[in-house]
Image (cartoon, rainbow, N blue to C red):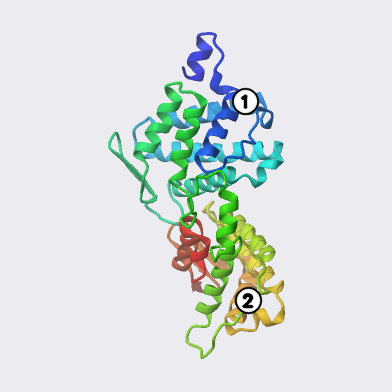
Amino acid sequence: PTPAAAAAAGQPDKKATAKYWAEALQSAFRKLGDFSDKVFESCMTEALAKEQSEAVTAAFDTMRQKSRRGMQQGLQKVSKSMLEFLDKVEATCTHLKHSVGLQKLRTAADRLSVLAAAKNLLNPGGQVDYDPMKSLKVGGVDVHLELNRFIGAWISDYKAKEFGEGLADFFDDFKEQEEVEDRSPSGTAAASAAAAAGGTAPGEGLLRMVRDALTSAMAGRDEKLDLAPHCFPADTTAAFSADVNAAIDHMLHKRKRTMQQGLKELAGATDRLLHAQKTECIWSSGAKLIWKGAKKLRKVTSRMVVDYGTHIQYEAMKSLVVGGVAIHAELNNFLAAWRLRSQEESGE
């Protein structure tokens, strides 16, 4: 029964309990290749479990309106509630910070939240293609069957394990493209071994992004990029990544003030990344050009609000001009690469 039906019948709703959600998350994490089994009932309060249960029910009710708008809003609700739920669970059980399952689920939910936006900077037409009872594509990915199973497991009162598997299958459709599937118990160790054998190590994707950005900025010059192994270490690129994500979050609010704030934060992130490197790491003309541009953008976006219209003209979904230069298309390309494909592809 739904929470409302259970309440009307005077019965407790088992899906609104910490026990149910702990089992569901455990099942989802295992489905995503995390066999650490570290999700406990104590990782969440009964109040949080009830809140999450109500949020999922509300999201599914909205989706079942059988309209494109209802589906978009429902997808936004379920992704947002999952992100907030995971944050609160991790805050209580800090050991989950290193959980592969939690990281994968959070990344997928974050990507879905961007794709499901009714209108966003990445695609004015939206990323949801929905034909009621027939098909559903989000960001070009067919998720109709997975969503049906996800909803069915909830409304049919399936066990927490089955619901968790349905949850994992659905969100797994929105995983990062470069993610390598590994369903074995030793997934983390295998990933480390792959990195040692020449695979993508943590931070390596961002380093490639930086290389591509510097090389692209050097286009047309008789110059070859030569970065020493100590250039752009993982701690600096990780901080840059976090700052860029925060900047993009502000931009996607689609308001003049938040666009200005997001651009300012993007410029600041770039400035700090380059400033943290040794001289030989930023000696190339590409680094100098990017740094110069970041400083100029930071200066322009730091103007007082009364000067905003003089230096930045922004019309949501249509145009963006900064310092007299139209950058709408370029910014969209960067956002699409960073959020919808992979950070590694966003350098150019």
Label tally: 2
The crowding category of the residue bearing disc 1, from other C-alpha atoms within 10 Å (few below 14, some 14 to 19, many at least 20), is many
Q: Is residue 257 visible in this depiction of the protein? A: no
Q: Is residue 83 visible in this depiction of the protein? A: yes
Who is closer to the viewer here, 72 or 301? Answer: 72
Who is closer to the viewer here, 328 or 227? Answer: 227
Q: Amino acid at mark 1?
A: Ala
Mark 2: secondary structure:
helix
Q: Is residue 294 above or below residue 64?
A: below
Residue 144 image offset from top left, x and y in percent: 35, 39
- Quick one: label 2 or label 1, which is nearer the N terminus? 1
Q: Residue furthest top?
A: 10
Circles 2 and 1: CB atoms closer than 8 Å: no
Q: Amino acid at mark 2?
A: Trp
Q: Is residue 209 above or below residue 74?
A: below
On residue 85, which mark appears? none
On residue 291, which mark appears? 2
C-alpha span from label 2 to label 1: 49 Å
Q: Residue furthest bottom?
A: 222
Mark 1: secondary structure:
helix
Please tell me which residue is depicted at 59% across the width and 43% down the height of the picture. 102
Q: Is residue 6 above or below residue 318?
A: above
Please tell me which residue is depicted at 39% across the width and 37% down the height of the picture. 146
Who is closer to the viewer here, 152 or 309? Answer: 152
On residue 18, which mark appears? 1
Residue 225 image offset from top left, x and y in percent: 56, 82
Residue 270 image offset from top left, x and y in percent: 63, 69
